[in-house]
Image (cartoon, helix red, strand yellow):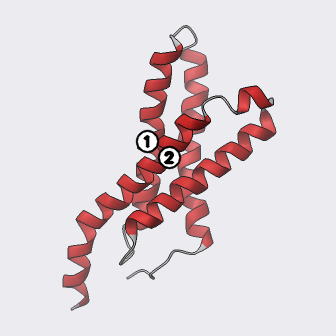
Amino acid sequence: MGTAEPRMEGYVGAALVICGIAWIWDFVASIYFAGQMALNLTIISSLVYLEASFIGAFVLTRKLPKNLMLIGLRAGLYAFLINLAFRMILFELWEALWGVVIYFISFTIGGMLGGLLANKIYVGKKAVVAS
């Protein structure tokens, strides 16, 4: 059974999984979808970011006993901060801040949904296993 709160390594690991999927998608999108309209690419990208955050938060929260949505939200926020720092280091300011709202919304909602799914699937099973 897991502890009530993950350690910092758990949050960083989940955030790096989330950011890794997002960065791979950004790379693939810049190569293969260079001619796409900005709105179409933004919608597709936001769905990929949401799915990445969902996966990272679910993996982090599936063995924890409580506060799963809050922990998933924190994982999404940490992923957002790591992604923002990465973009600020590599790109110019105007290019780094493009899409910050999309990243924030997708990472936080995906993190909460990952925690919610872990709550729905695993909380009832943990009570049976513990008794």
| Residue type marked 2 | Phe
Q: Are marks 1 and 2 in contact (CB under 8 Å)?
A: yes
| Residue type marked 1 | Leu
Q: Which mark is residue 50?
A: 1
**Residue indicated by mark 2:** 107
Viewer-closest of 23 and 113: 113
Q: Which mark is residue 69?
A: none
* Relative horizontal placement of residue 34, taking residue 55 as reference (left or right): right
- Residue 99 position in % (x across, y down): 60, 31
| Residue most extreme to the front | 101
SS at circle 1: helix
* Relative horizontal placement of residue 32, taking residue 119 as reference (left or right): right
The N terminus sits in image quarter: bottom left
Instruction: Say which residue appears at 55% left-offset and 39% top-offset.
Output: 103
* Relative horizontal placement of residue 111, taking residue 11 as reference (left or right): left
Instruction: Say which residue appears at 53% left-offset and 41% top-offset.
Output: 21
Mark 2: few, some, or many residues within 10 Å (few <14, many ≥20)?
Answer: many
Viewer-closest of 73 and 55: 73
Viewer-closest of 81 and 52: 81
Instruction: State which quadrant residue 63 falls in.
Output: bottom left
Instruction: Say which residue appears at 58% left-offset and 12% top-offset.
Output: 34
- Residue 20 position in % (x across, y down): 58, 44
Q: Which label's residue is closer to the chain start, 1 or 2? A: 1
* Relative horizontal placement of residue 61, taking residue 41 as reference (left or right): left
| Residue most extreme to the bottom | 131
Classify 124 as above or below 113: below
SS at circle 2: helix
